[in-house]
Amino acid sequence: MLYADVVNDDGLLRIGELSRRSGVSPELLRAWERRYGLLRPTRSGGGLRLYSSADLERVRAMQRHLAAGFAAAEAAALATRPVDASDRPYAPDAARADLATAVAAFDEARVHAVLDALLGAATLDAVLSDVIIPFLHELGDRWERGEVSVAQEHFASGILRGRLLALTRGWDRGLGPRILLACAPREQHDLGLIAFGLALRSRGFRILYLGADTPLESVAGAARAAALEFVVVSAVHPDRFRAVAPQLEELARERRLSIGGAGVVEVDLEVPRLTGGAVEEAERVTALARTA
Amino acid sequence: MLYADVVNDDGLLRIGELSRRSGVSPELLRAWERRYGLLRPTRSGGGLRLYSSADLERVRAMQRHLAAGFAAAEAAALATRPVDASDRPYAPDAARADLATAVAAFDEARVHAVLDALLGAATLDAVLSDVIIPFLHELGDRWERGEVSVAQEHFASGILRGRLLALTRGWDRGLGPRILLACAPREQHDLGLIAFGLALRSRGFRILYLGADTPLESVAGAARAAALEFVVVSAVHPDRFRAVAPQLEELARERRLSIGGAGVVEVDLEVPRLTGGAVEEAERVTALARTA
Amino acid sequence: MLYADVVNDDGLLRIGELSRRSGVSPELLRAWERRYGLLRPTRSGGGLRLYSSADLERVRAMQRHLAAGFAAAEAAALATRPVDASDRPYAPDAARADLATAVAAFDEARVHAVLDALLGAATLDAVLSDVIIPFLHELGDRWERGEVSVAQEHFASGILRGRLLALTRGWDRGLGPRILLACAPREQHDLGLIAFGLALRSRGFRILYLGADTPLESVAGAARAAALEFVVVSAVHPDRFRAVAPQLEELARERRLSIGGAGVVEVDLEVPRLTGGAVEEAERVTALARTA
DNA sequence: ATAGGTTTTGTCAAGCTTTTGTACAT
DNA sequence: ATGTACAAAAGCTTGACAAAACCTAT
């Protein structure tokens, strides 16, 4: 189930099944159709109503509006109103707001649509530094202030992780210098590191990505096994670095190690620190590699 | 009876012996020969049928096919068809071995190439249950035995997570029942849960995915906010369940909750458990949802 | 592999066995065939229905859809959709067919949806060489045979150009070796060249892209101005090369020039020729650059 | 919400044919 | 060993029927 399904969405429901799925009686569904034109079912050869998934969505919207206190006529008007698909060129601020709304409603399709529009309108660098990374920060802040639930934060990072990882495909191939990326032990936030990797990739690096919560011995081992010179270890929380400070400094003597992520600002180690944004630091690392 | 009486110099069997060895009556053997050309015995000077061991194999194949439910004509066609071993490129065992080699060498391009070939050759269900999930298990086992480094394990799961998440796009769309998937608190292994979600998706479910390490209050909150009936919480380690047993049982009273993942086997809770593989349990959940 | 899997390859079932395996009564199976064309069994000499494993799959799909609440007619329509026959996640042939249908109907959303699904399921390399480039060839062939209108051909190449160009963003940045790509003078087909550029980019090259119909003096000038060593000139029609043969040979003495595209096969020049597919030749060029 | 009519769909039956294991005469 | 016969099992087609689900109109 793939190609046709993506567009064609689904089959058609008869009124009984629509009723079952929406919890609205068939009589009422027909009344809403007759009175407010809420639904526009196609018909079978014999005249039975056939509803699409869009109809089901409209019924659900109608129910939400009714529950919110609107009169039936108004609720129907709201539910049938077309979703404005304004094709503005590239508006990072509006996009962040859109993402926030979509995440609040667990609306996966909308999140993807916003990301599609963004990636269609601007470079990955721009989308990462103007939208995705700031959005993640905002999300984190609002989570701390209790304005966003853990579920919403998880939902959002799941989708973003999927989108970003999809862009990483093949990022270890080719001719450029190879760099190893890993999160410090016990560090679970990997999205910033992935973004950093993507920024590096678009500058010609080959990425060996180990991801969240990687023991430093493994980092060192992999760097040795794959003969890598450059290594970046990332953490959002400074304690993650402090807990392994000696090992980090040892690795720094062996390889060209940098540490990055929000956790670096308060840490004092004998290791170069990437304190800026992912794209900015990718640019700096590239410049460094050029001279090396 | 002497050996020489039933088997002649060239190792050829007479019909009685073929009958005895195969359990098929001589009459029926002759009928199969006449009707379907199943057997092509040579003849003795006196006209007696002389069967080779290949004939015996064909008879046994015929019996297997009959037992499998094929009618005689079709079973014979299958038994006489030349063994064209494999003209289709789906070889799960070889693929797993390939993946292991590629991962050991941190060869990202090769991992992707293997996955491309697999996804092009078989259904997602098959690839998940024959290759990806077993591969992850093998990887875990070999990690426990120290044959695989953490770095290799991380490298592999990063790539697989990216590929699987890419396939999840739009999995919340459609007409089917909606189901919430989350890992138990402190549980970081999400790949099995993603695979389970994909298997459910291909059976028509709509997926709301919260991912690793999700507090149960968030699960409950999201289930309420999005009006979801079905919820699955997963963990690889049983302690993850035990630590939140009361909350799980409370949630189970409120929603249709199941728990799954390797961690369920040793846990004793008043909550339905999904103890099988991802695809298998997806099938079961689908059946369950039907009865609801 | 289980015995059943081997047999399922192409064994034929009679209606009783199909009934046993699916749990659907023979009467109902015949009714579904008669009413909805769900099954298309071949017939034995005497007229008995003979079903393939694909038929069994269709019956099972039908049952799933019924269980999901669809009425029989709608469930059958879903189960007979061509995509259900090969529900591999990555089905290049099905995708090409889908693209052709969508193009014939000027259905842009569907073209995008198919491409989205493909790029989610496989690597760009695979999609280029398995789907996009073959599709362009088919389109050209069918245009020559008059089966496709100019409008359809323009529509398709417009969309594909847009999608591919969106992926080229920033492809001149970074650390890799630089390569100049241009179409020969008067050559308008640039899609293959873009695909080639993308394959090179994913291997670490930096691309300087001049596009369709570029005078060779401009190519030479740009190569000199940007100090580029590698140059590829492409054409679909051999005359485009012949018309500028001396200049090509001169440029080849100055830079590492290759010529590519469908037009190279019949041309005889003192210039290295890239006669294979875009991805394949990108791999070769990468290997060359490595040794250089 | 009800009444009265229509469509859809699973099931069944009658009468006939094909398939297939077994039996028997030569 | 061969060829023919035979009867049970399984299938085929046509036609019909009744319960469930839907329709419109009041």
Image (cartoon, coloured by chain):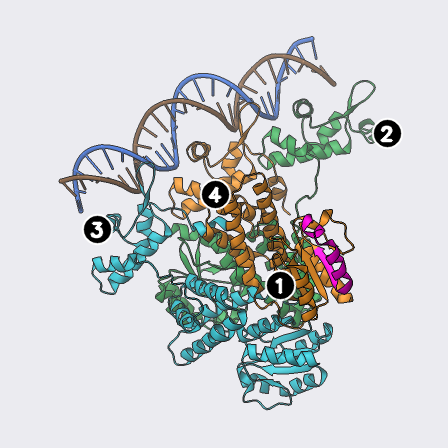
Chain colours: A cyan, B green, C orange, D blue, E brown
Q: Which residue is mark 1?
A: C209
Element type where label 1 sits in the image: strand
Dot 2 and dot 3 residues touching (CB under 8 Å) = no
User: Is B109 on the left or on the right of A149, as rendered?
Assistant: right
Q: Residue B79 is drawn in which quadrant?
A: top right
For marks 1 and 3, give the CA distance: 59 Å
Same chain for mark 2 and mark 4? The answer is: no
Please report the residue visible at 43 percent of the width from the left and 31 percent of the height from the top. C34
Among numbered discs 1 and 4, the one appearing first in the sequence: 4
Q: Which residue is mark 2?
A: B9
Chain to which mark 1 belongs: C
Q: Which residue is mark 4?
A: C81
Q: Residues within 10 Å of mark 1 (few under 14, many from 20)?
A: some
Q: How many marks?
A: 4
| Amino acid under disc 2 | Asp
Please report the residue visible at 78 percent of the width from the left and 21 percent of the height from the top. B48
| Amino acid under disc 3 | Arg
Q: Report x, y in % for residue B243.
A: 47, 73
Q: Which residue is mark 3?
A: A35
Please report the residue visible at 65 percent of the width from the left and 55 percent of the height from the top. C185
The residue at the far right in this view is: B9
Chain to which mark 3 belongs: A
Same chain for mark 1 and mark 2? The answer is: no
Chain to which mark 4 belongs: C
For marks 4 and 3, give the CA distance: 35 Å
Which is more foreground, mark 4 or mark 3? 3
Q: Report x, y in % for residue B160.
A: 59, 63
Magenta segment range? C238-259
For marks 1 and 2, give the CA distance: 77 Å
